[in-house]
């Protein structure tokens, strides 16, 4: 049976803005209060997704969430009409209004952890939405994320959906951003590598001092249990706390894997040698560890350029290509490294650059924008076809963006009650375009 790795990219929502909400994410803080361009952001994301589809990759889209999140604002005591709720929040607690307006669900690497059927005890493909408890604006995503995933992977014979983990710091879970699957062919049993930032139930365990470690070992272990992964093919490795303190808030900012390739910065992990020995033991067949030394790319350059938030994809021809943000091309050290990489004896043979700057300014590169789902032919046939990116869907989505999105949004604009109406009108139409049914609360 044929096997694929599909990418599901997050469609950027109409309220995309820069609110400086993510302490520990340098780009988010540096760009706080800049004006955003939601229309350009959505189009940049669509262009990247379409380019991958044109390369022969299976490409899907995940719908954005309903923002402003009026329900959370009501839950914390703002009342009256929707317009009154927005106005009160803006006057009394603008930071909370900002949190309820973020389009952060675009970064679908944080939507869920996904284990392909080849790895799980019951032979089903498993999904656990990430609870994202470390950040208020992200902690309000998982319920709708679960609804959207269930509307897309809607077949109990093949797909198993779990509830997100308990909403407590001990179970901080950031989804696929801290999870990599290594394998030979996509349909082979793989090794699932979970990268955590701290061990929450062990107060003396080593952790970062300055910035939060969003992912806990306890969360990673819980997801592995839920998905029915076997110890013999699962590895837990701690992220280096020193790099978290330099702005590496997710593992996918410092390492990325594809099939039997792990591309990583030499400072990415703690106890690298022991962990890599375990990986060699647990993954059948060859493995290519591509180490990027600090002497070639400093952590600061990796964080600014997102060299590791690249997508490494395998084209239908078998060739591996690295999909990088144009920010990598603009950084002399990183660009030089990428050109050198292509001359090294590794499976990565080509680099292609994409402009995703609207997302980058909030700390989201190409890899943040996608959720990987390795599937076989039967599973792919069971996916809701309304979300799979064809030329026709691309055209419809582009037209939809043109029609509904603003080309500028400032923090003050978030107080405009019209934004609620605009956003709901857009999403209502989107659920029809993508055949999602009623995934949003306003539709119920
Ligand atoms: O969670 N930024 C996101 C970026 C997520 C990137 N994802 C991965 N690395 N997989 C975050 O920090 C910024 C929002 C703001 O400040 O307006 C934000 O949420």
Image (tube, rainbow, N blue to C red):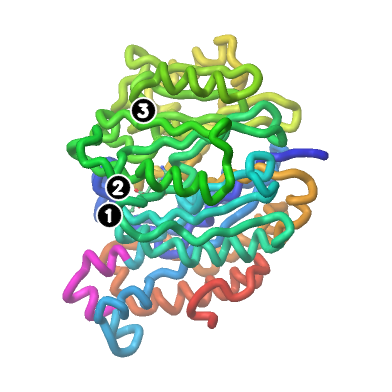
Q: Main secondary structure of the magenta part?
A: helix
Judge by depth and name the residue closer to the eye, 167 or 428: 167
Confirm or reject: label 1 Cβ below 8 Å from ligand 1: yes
Tell me the number on the disc at residue 302: 3
Residue at left offset 50%, top offset 16%: 339
Q: Are marks 1 and 2 in contact (CB under 8 Å)?
A: yes
> In which quadrant of the rendered view does residue 51 lie?
top right
> In which quadrant of the rendered view does residue 401 lie?
bottom right
Q: Report the number of numbered marks.
A: 3
How many neighbours does mark 1 have within 10 angstroms: few (below 14), some (14-19), or many (20 or more)?
many
Mark 3 residue element = helix
Identify whether 155 is placed above or below 266.
below
Q: Are marks 3 and 1 in contact (CB under 8 Å)?
A: no
Q: CA distance from mark 3 to mark 1?
A: 21 Å
Mark 1 residue element = loop
Most extreme residue toward the bottom, as rendered?
80
How many neighbours does mark 2 have within 10 angstroms: few (below 14), some (14-19), or many (20 or more)?
many
Q: Please tell me which of labels 3 and 2 falls first in the chain.
A: 2
């Amino acid at each position: 049976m044929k096997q694929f790795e599909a990418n599901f990219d997050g469609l950027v929502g109409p309220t995309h803005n820069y609110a400086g909400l993510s302490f520990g994410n340098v780009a988010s803080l540096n760009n706080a209060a800049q004006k955003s361009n939601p229309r350009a952001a959505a189009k940049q994301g669509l262009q990247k997704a379409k380019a991958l589809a044109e390369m022969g990759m299976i490409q899907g889209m995940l719908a954005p969430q309903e923002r402003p999140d009026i329900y959370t604002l009501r839950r914390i005591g703002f009342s009256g009409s929707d317009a009154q709720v927005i106005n009160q929040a803006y006057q009394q607690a603008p930071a909370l209004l900002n949190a309820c307006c973020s389009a952060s669900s675009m970064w679908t690497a944080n939507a869920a952890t996904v284990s392909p059927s080849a790895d799980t005890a019951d032979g089903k493909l498993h999904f656990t939405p990430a609870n994202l408890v470390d950040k208020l604006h992200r902690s309000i995503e998982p319920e709708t994320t679960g609804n959207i995933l269930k509307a897309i992977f809607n077949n109990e014979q093949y797909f198993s959906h779990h509830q997100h983990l308990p909403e407590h710091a001990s179970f901080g879970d950031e989804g696929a951003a801290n999870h990599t699957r290594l394998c030979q062919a996509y349909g082979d049993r793989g090794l699932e590598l979970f990268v955590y930032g701290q061990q929450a139930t062990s107060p003396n365990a080593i952790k970062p001092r300055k910035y939060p470690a969003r992912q806990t070992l306890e969360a990673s272990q819980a997801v592995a249990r839920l998905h029915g992964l076997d110890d013999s093919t699962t590895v837990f490795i701690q992220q280096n706390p020193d790099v978290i303190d330099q702005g590496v808030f997710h593992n996918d900012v410092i390492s990325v894997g594809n099939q039997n390739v792990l591309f990583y910065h030499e400072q990415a992990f703690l106890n690298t040698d022991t962990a890599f020995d375990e990986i060699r033991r647990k993954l059948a067949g060859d493995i290519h560890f591509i180490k990027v030394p600090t002497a070639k790319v400093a952590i600061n350059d990796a964080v600014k350029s997102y060299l590791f938030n690249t997508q490494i994809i395998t084209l239908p021809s078998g060739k591996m290509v690295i999909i990088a943000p144009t920010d990598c091309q603009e950084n002399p050290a990183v660009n030089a490294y990428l050109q050198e990489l292509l001359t090294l004896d590794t499976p990565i043979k080509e680099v292609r650059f994409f402009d995703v700057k609207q997302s980058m300014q909030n700390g989201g590169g190409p890899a943040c924008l996608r959720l990987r789902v390795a599937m076989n032919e039967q599973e792919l046939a069971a996916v809701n076809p309304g979300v799979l990116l064809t030329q026709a869907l691309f055209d419809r989505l582009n037209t939809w963006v043109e029609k509904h999105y603003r080309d500028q949004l400032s923090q003050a604009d978030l107080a405009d009650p019209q934004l609620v109406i605009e956003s709901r009108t857009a999403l209502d139409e989107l659920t029809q375009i993508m055949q999602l049914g009623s995934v949003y609360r306003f539709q119920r």
